[in-house]
Amino acid sequence: MKIQPVIMSGGSGTRLWPMSRDARPKQFLKLITDKTMFQETALRVSPREEGFAPPVVIAGARHGAIVAKQLAEIDIAQAEIILEPAPRNTAAVAAVASAWVEARNEDALILLMPADHHIPEAAGFRAAVANAAEAAADGHIATFGIKPDRPHTGYGYIEAGEKIGDGIYRVAAFKEKPDAETAQSYLNQGGFYWNAGIFLFRASVMLEELNKHAADIRTAATAALKESVMSGAARRLDEDAFAAAPSNSIDYAVMEKTDRAAVAAPIDVGWTDIGSWSEVATQSDDESVIDLAGGNIIRSDGALVAAAGVEGLIIVATEDAVLVARKDDAQQVRAIVDELKQRGRRDLL
Amino acid sequence: MKIQPVIMSGGSGTRLWPMSRDARPKQFLKLITDKTMFQETALRVSPREEGFAPPVVIAGARHGAIVAKQLAEIDIAQAEIILEPAPRNTAAVAAVASAWVEARNEDALILLMPADHHIPEAAGFRAAVANAAEAAADGHIATFGIKPDRPHTGYGYIEAGEKIGDGIYRVAAFKEKPDAETAQSYLNQGGFYWNAGIFLFRASVMLEELNKHAADIRTAATAALKESVMSGAARRLDEDAFAAAPSNSIDYAVMEKTDRAAVAAPIDVGWTDIGSWSEVATQSDDESVIDLAGGNIIRSDGALVAAAGVEGLIIVATEDAVLVARKDDAQQVRAIVDELKQRGRRDLL
């Protein structure tokens, strides 16, 4: 049974402003390697790797062309591109993906993945997926529990319960992003893992669980897919039908309610959720950076950026905008984006 | 007797990099007002003001066109533009200026001024010049002693001696840039003034003093002027002849040796030598700046610059370069310029 990768590429995050823009969210940027994060995600589970079907990509309505272009650049053909008329969060995406597989009279394993995660050890990741496949085939919805290397307060945690296979456990509990003290206690205690937000499941199992816990989402997604129309190389979900789906995360809508949740753990493949500039630690090439004191994160689309006598800063220069912020307070970018909205500067968002 | 303004515009300062470049030094930039510092200097003593002849501008060989253009923009005609094939410091400039006046069989008062000083109270400055004119006509070389409002360690000081007129004193001593303690003692003691680097003197007096103390500079300057050729709207000094002039400042070559030095003091006209970004405190217009924490100096040629969670910084964005430095360590810019030279990035200098 081939695994059906489904790449969730609907994010329009502005936390990596000014490089990340509405028209070009961070997953479509070359932030870490010489490929975009979306491309790295697609290559990680490419049909050229053993056991994977060509991917389904579920993206925002405005991003059909960039998805097609970026797939062509890495020679991935026969992908299905599904466009959301408006974002309805990850539960609706899981429902669409499962309905898409069901419509093909298949019951493939779906590997549902965000497009903006950085996983340097791709082979290790594929091995972890292969290891979780049996539990998923048996009817579990497998999550991936990343081995925590520090008491990170920006991620949710999964507490592993009863062992049900080699490196596979029932989920004892999902834990919201903890405070520092709680995060430290998770590390001390052991058996707690970062929730990677990646899922492996049989399409039929997800549809059953959606029917049980979020029937309106399942109904809306199925209708939106049924009434979808082709638009260029992409399939566009029906706007009205999809709008009827409540916006909810798969975590809240399904995972915290189902008794079929499993966690593959510990996964140790260098996984990072690139959520803010502080996680994009690599610099632009030397050509465009002078960092005299060192210790700054400097990125440039072209202009030479020179930092003198300053440390611990994030400096990002694009053609029409420059950001200077503190590395340890990278969330401030949100305040800048809000200010731009206030000023009506859509041209910069 | 009309006063002959001579504007020393030979600076190629890179301390205001990245806005200031070899091809466009800071005096040709709109850093403080809606006119360039060179234009403000020319307007301060324009022929439209009572008592001033059209200016002589002495500039670097590459800057003839920009001088002509910037004079045309402010409707100052009949200026004499003299180009230095290579910079030979201020003593040579004073010599050329004096020789130029002498060649016209005049003995005008020359008002020798740098092009990159900021003097917001232009009328007050002209009044100070008028007040010093009598002493200059009597054969003194008048300097202008700025009333110090803080123990600045970046300026030279003039100690006033015997009073020889209303607000005019003999110079008791020129003092190099002092350390903080010495600067404070000058303020406590009184009678010490910032040396503005502006001079008022009869051409014949300067030539006599140059003959006495720096005859080689005088000889070289006179020859360079005599053998000068017109090049477009500008007069180009003879390269070989001018190269023979030792490079020395008028302060060392003449002022510290002559017994004809006088100081007009105290002058209180808001004078500032714009030597580094820390003195350019005004911001670009709000359109191109978001400064969430406040307290940063932000300048932009166009791109929006957003600062979040940072204070006390200088951020300067041009089309091809961005500077981030500390306000209190603005001299670091020099280190960046050195690094660019090392890298052979003449395109950015």
Image (spheres, coloured by chain):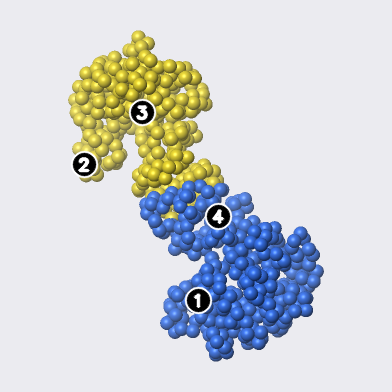
Chain colours: A blue, B yellow
Disc 3 secondary structure class? loop
Residues at marks 1 and 2, CA–CA distance in whole angstroms: 63 Å
User: Which is closer to the viewer, label 1 or label 2?
Assistant: 1
Label 1 packing within 10 angstroms: few (<14), some (14-19), many (20+): some
The chain that hosts pointer 3 is: B
Disc 2 secondary structure class? helix
Quarter of image, res B343: top left
Quarter of image, res B338: top left
> Which residue does the image show at 49% across and 20% down from the upper left?
B232
Residue A290 in view: yes
Query: Can you identify the residue that label 3 sits on?
Result: B87
> Which residue does the image show at 21% across and 41% down from the upper left?
B182
User: Which is closer to the viewer, label 1 or label 3?
Assistant: 1
Instruction: Give the percent coordinates (x, y) of residue B88.
Output: 33, 27
The amino acid type of the residue labelled 1 equals Asp
Residues flagged by tags 1 and 4 on a common chain: yes
